[in-house]
Image: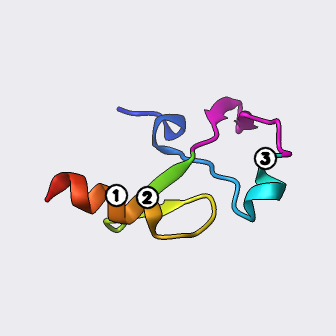
């Protein structure tokens, strides 16, 4: 059985100049360290930290 930490993704969302100021790369969640991701997939859509579709379009172009 996978732990919740293996299924958990964390992503900072915002404008690039502000995101670049965040130094935290891992966050403690219920006793497990979760790494910060640049993008995440939800319901087949790839979302990046700036909420643009750039990562989603790149993913579709690679798989097509």
Lower position in the chain sequence, tag 3 or tag 2: 3
Whether the magenta-drawn stretch holds residue 33 is answered as yes
Question: Badge 3 is on which residue?
Answer: 20
Q: What residue is drawn where x is 31% and y is 56%?
A: 59
> SS for tag 2?
helix
Asked if disc 1 and disc 2 are in contact, CB closer than 8 Å, the reply is yes
**Quadrant assignment, res 52:** bottom right
Residue 45 lies left or right of residue 26; in this view the side is: left
Given residues 5 and 27, the one toward you in this image is 27
Q: Is residue 24 above or below residue 41?
A: above
> SS for tag 1?
helix
Question: Badge 1 is on which residue?
Answer: 58
Q: What residue is drawn where x is 72% and y is 34%?
A: 25
Asked if disc 3 and disc 1 are in contact, CB closer than 8 Å, the reply is no
Whole-Å distance between the Cαs marked 3 and 2?
A: 18 Å
Residue 48's tag is: none
Whole-Å distance between the Cαs marked 3 and 1?
A: 22 Å
**Quadrant assignment, res 2:** top left
Whether the magenta-drawn stretch holds residue 41 is answered as no
Residue 55's tag is: 2
Residue 51 lies left or right of residue 60; in this view the side is: right
> SS for tag 3?
loop
Which residues make up the magenta segment? Answer: 21-37
Asked if disc 3 and disc 2 are in contact, CB closer than 8 Å, the reply is no
Whole-Å distance between the Cαs marked 1 and 2?
A: 5 Å
Mark 2 neighbour class, 10 Å CA radius: few under 14, some 14 to 19, many 20 or more: many
């Amino acid at each position: 059985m996978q732990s919740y930490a293996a299924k958990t993704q964390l992503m900072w969302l915002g404008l690039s100049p502000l995101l670049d100021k965040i130094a935290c790369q891992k966050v403690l969640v219920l006793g497990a360290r979760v790494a910060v991701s640049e993008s995440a997939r939800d319901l087949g859509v790839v979302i990046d930290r700036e909420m643009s579709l750039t990562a989603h379009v790149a993913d579709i172009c690679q798989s097509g």
